[in-house]
Structure formats: C-alpha cells, structure tokens
Image (cartoon, helix red, strand yellow):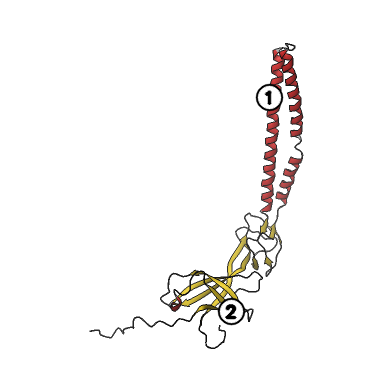
Amino acid sequence: FCLGTGTVSAAELDCLVKPEMYVEVSSPVVSVLEEILVETGDMVMRGQPLARLEASVEKARVKMAELRIMQMSDIENRKEQLRFKKLNYERMMELREKNSVPQFEADKAKTEYALAIHELAKARELRIMARANLEMERRQLELRTIRSPIDGIVVDRFAMVGESVEGRSIMKLAMVNPLKVEMIAPTEYFGLIKKGMRADIYPEKPANKVFEATVTVVDKLIDPASGSFTVRMALPNPDDILIGGVNCLARFSFNTPESKPELYSSVSPTTSIE
C-alpha cells in the first residue's frame, strides 16, 4: 500500500489498523438467555445493557426484601415504649427520693427503662440487616443483566434466546477508540522510531484522509530471520470514522534511512580458508 506520490524523502512504512482489543462477553452466573438487546454491528457504550438472563426468582427475592423494610414499623413502637419507660423511671426516682414508693418499684422502673433501650437498639440493628439484605438481592438481580465492559462495536453473537450461558461466551466486542496500528519496521529504523513519537497515518478507508497516531510500543528485539522489529501505535477514533482491519501507510517526520550493508559475507562450506 503506497501513496503514489513519487520520490519521497520522509520515512514511510506499511501498517495495519486493528481494534485496540477484542472482548468476549460472558455471564458471571449460570442461567438461560432471556433477551438480547443489541445486534451485530451496533455501537455500544461502557455499562450499556447487552442482554438479560432469566431472573424471575431474583425479582421475587428483591420484592420480598422491599416488603420487609416497608413492614418494619417496630422501631417507632420501640421509640414510644422507650419514651414512656423513661418518663416512668424519672417519676419513680423523684418519688423514691421522697420515700413515697418502695425500693423495688424504683428498681423495676429502672430495669424496664434499660430493657426499652436495648429493644430499640435491637430493632435498629434488624433494620440495618434488612437494608443490607435488600442491597444483596438487588446485586444478585443486577448480575442477570449483561453489560458492556468497553466502548466498542458488536462483532459477533454466539448465543440465542433460550440457550444456557454456562461455560460459553454470549457475544464478542471490539474496542475501536482508540484503534491500534501495527507495523513491521526494518532494522534501519531501529533507534529512529521511539515511544511517544507521532506519525501520520494514511488508511485505505476512508480514502484521502490523514490521521495522527502515537507510538506506544517499540520492540526491544530484532528478529534476525526477517531483519525487522515490531512497532505499535495508538490511533484516536472519537468519531468512529476509521474502521479496523484495513491497510495503511505510516509516515514519520525523519528521512528514510539508508540500508545498512551486510556486516558479514557468507562463506561456502566448500571454500577453504587459509
């Protein structure tokens, strides 16, 4: 793939535009697929619902937990009892100071007051536990909604409505912002292409468009068999103009380096060396 611009001094290398990553979405629980909310080719956002699993039991548990909290009027009753026991205890203490009531009556009022405090605290603890149980049931229900872990595009679907999702992927997503540009560079470019460097990218599609990518990875090793090393670049794609899986040309700001001569010439096995 080339630009066809004639003699070029700037360094140019063939490359390939690919999705940044592929994600196969699966279910954290064993259930049956009830509804698929997206189609192949749809753009999805992180957190967007993709599919729903059968969840009749989980919905019923959430409803029961909500009813338990609504029916917990015991706290208000305990508050009224505590208020009455406190008034009675204070009245008995005043009468006892005047020797108007026997000691056991004062002790009884004190004990009833202490028990009322304990019962109110117990009722409050039960309400906290009921709220925690409701939160747990809601989270269990939420697991029945499969959400997208990335911003991307639906590449493929592997399951149909009514099928079990145990031990299998439901669909495959591809992250297309940013995209990934992969390039194989000859050894002459080693040391010239560095992490953080920018390059102009000319993709096959869309035609006559130029984009800017940033070098993110430069292979530290050279493949002796091919005399090359790998370079990876990040290519922003916020408007989803670019597509993955197309060839491209990367143009760098430095001039095309000259090919290095062979350091060692090969010697025929039959040649004698004196």
Instruction: Check disc 1 and report its element: helix, strand or loop.
Output: helix
Instruction: Check disc 2 and report its element: helix, strand or loop.
Output: strand
Q: Nearer the viewer, residue 69 or 20?
A: 20
Question: Which residue was labeled with disc 2?
Answer: 202
User: What residue is rendered at 73% in x and 24% in y?
Assistant: 86
User: What residue is rendered at 69% in x and 17% in y?
Assistant: 107
Question: Which residue was labeled with disc 1?
Answer: 114
Task: Choose mark 2 or mark 1, whichever is in front.
Answer: 2
> Residue 219 vs residue 178: left or right?
left
Extreme residue toward the left, this view = 274
Quadrant for the N terminus, please: bottom right
User: Rounded to the nearest whole Å, what is the CA distance between mark 2 and mark 1?
Assistant: 81 Å
Return the x and y of residue 73 as percentages of the image width and height. Answer: 76, 35
Return the x and y of residue 33 as percentages of the image width and height. Answer: 68, 59
Q: Is residue 19 visible?
A: yes
Rendered view: 132 above or below 237: above
User: What residue is rendered at 70% in x and 58% in y?
Assistant: 52
Return the x and y of residue 188 as percentages of the image width and height. Answer: 44, 78
Q: Quadrant of residue 164?
A: bottom right
Return the x and y of residue 105 as percentages of the image width and height. Answer: 72, 15
Q: Crowdedness of circle 1 by 10 Å Cα count: few (<14), some, many (20+)?
A: some
